[in-house]
Image (cartoon, rainbow, N blue to C red):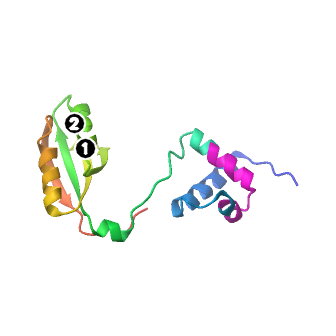
Amino acid sequence: MTMIMNEKTTNDADEALIALLRENARASTAALARKLGLARSTVQSRLERLERNGVIRGYTVELGHGARARQVQAHAMIAVEPQQQHSVERKLRAMPAVATLLTVSGSYDLIAMLAAESTEALDAALDELRACPGVKSTTTSIVLSRRFDR
């Protein structure tokens, strides 16, 4: 039996594959194929195409609640002096406490998501962030709990 895959079917299968990988990025190609009802070689080809096209950028470890519970997390909203965003970004990229950096619209230019082992370490990271040339002002919110994470 030959199945002709149209674009919608392909997109649906790719989305289902990505959803399974989000649940378990370490799942074997054979296990993914069984769950999707596809041949292992088809799943392997899809994965290679998704990687080649930049849809899948990589496979990573996500820390569980236990590891995150031992960290103090915060979001720092950062206003940057004109023409200084790239130099501020370079400095923040070098700071281990900065887990994620987002550009945003509105009153602030960037949001840095920070994680540290203690409030003292977080305070030191925020001091370092505020001392970056080009940082005009910051507003920081400490994360109290995570309700859900997708």
In the image, residue 105 above or below residue 34: above
Q: Which mark is residue 110?
A: 1
In the structure shown, which secondary structural element does the residue marked by tag 2 occupy? helix
In the image, residue 148 above or below residue 33: below
Amino acid, disc 1: Leu
> Based on the displayed image, in which of its 4 quarters is residue 140 positioned?
bottom left
Counting the numbered discs, the total is: 2
How far across and down, in percent of the image, does residue 83 sit? 21, 28
Q: Are marks 2 and 1 in contact (CB under 8 Å)?
A: yes
- Which part of the image, by quadrant, shows the N terminus? bottom right
Residue marked by disc 2:
88
Magenta-drawn stretch, dominant element (helix, strand or loop): helix
How far across and down, in percent of the image, does residue 91 sit? 22, 38
In the image, residue 141 above or below residue 56: below
Camera-nearest residue between 64 and 109: 64
- Which part of the image, by quadrant, shows the C terminus? bottom left
Amino acid, disc 2: Val
Q: Residue at x 66, y 48 (%)?
A: 46
Q: Is residue 36 magenta?
A: yes
Residues rendered magenta in the picture: 32-48
> Based on the displayed image, in which of its 4 quarters is residue 135 positioned?
top left
Q: Residue at x 17, y 57 (%)?
A: 122
